[in-house]
Amino acid sequence: MLSRVPLLLALLVLGGCAALPALGGSEEPVSTRPPEVGQCRLLEPDDVLAASNASPPVDCARKHTAETFAVGEFPDDVSSAEGDIDDPALGAHVFDACEKQFRRFLGGDESLVMRSTVTWAWFRPSQEAWDGGARWWRCDVVGGGEESTSLVTLPRTAEGILLGDPEDKWLVCVDGPTVADSVKIPCSEKHTWRAVTTIVLGENDEDYPGDRVVAARTRDYCSDSVGAWMNYPVDYDFGYTWFHEAEWKAGNRRSICWAKTGE
């Protein structure tokens, strides 16, 4: 089974408010200025795997692979003046703040967003900016996922790209004999499997039911769900992606169902 959890569950990033003197006075001052919503950047996969990112904004009318859709500041009860920059509480705070904003920004519900080719990553200040008092966070729409070897170019703004009937280039497919071990690609490319529905496996306050239960529930639901999506043909193939306890604890409660399309 293919492991796809929004990149956001694993990522941290960036920093900002005035300027700090550089160590030894030989370098440019470290900026603590927060980023701005609506800024675009030309990021690479390695950039979004980093905890902080100082890439300069680019004109959104030009090529870019990331767009900032939310910026905020950590409250005192999450990050004190002496707070640890690697405290897991920072990630939990940002997840709660950005996940719903991400769906609203794209114009899709939770199921559709999980089946899209874009995800989000968050950034926090650099260590130097953090030490200087910066306590902001930034969330970016990113043109790709955790398996991407390159990021796709976004439109001038990604706002509303999942509204109505989204273009296939924003929806997830794979091209291979099975869903497992196949790299996700846009459905606008030649493909054999399409992510068509998702299943909700539990409520937010429920404990993880275990791998066997999650896999069995996912298989049974996806069998019925894909059959309905394909209008109940006599024979059809389906696949499914389910996630484990770590993703459950991070907030994911869904599995993904795939239909073999033959395209």
Image (cartoon, rainbow, N blue to C red):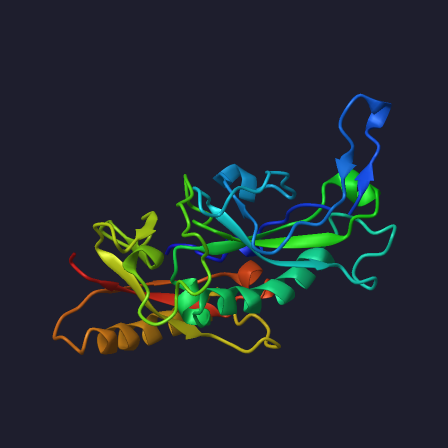
Residue at 41 percent across and 40 percent down: it is 150
Write the residue at 67% across / 45% down: 14
From the viewer's perspective, is 46 left or right of 198? right
Residue at the image position 39 percent from the left and 60 percent from the top: 116
**Viewed as shown, does residue 105 lie left or right of 242?**
right
Name of the residue lying farthest toward the right:
82
> 144 or 248, which is in the foreground?
144
Quadrant of the rendered structure where residue 225 is?
Answer: bottom left
Q: Position of residue 254 (x, y in %)?
A: 46, 69
Q: Is residue 114 left or right of residue 205?
A: left
Residue 214: tell me if it is visible: no
From this viewpoint, is residue 71 visible? Answer: yes
Q: Nearer the viewer, residue 18 or 190?
A: 18
Q: Where's residue 53, x and y in %?
A: 62, 41
Residue shown at the point (73%, 53%) measured from the top left: 136
| 68 is higher (above) or lower (below) than 236 | above
Q: Is residue 249 above or below residue 17?
A: below
Residue 208: x and y in percent read 56, 70
Q: Quadrant of the N terminus?
A: bottom left
Q: In the rendered image, which quarter contains the C terminus?
A: bottom left
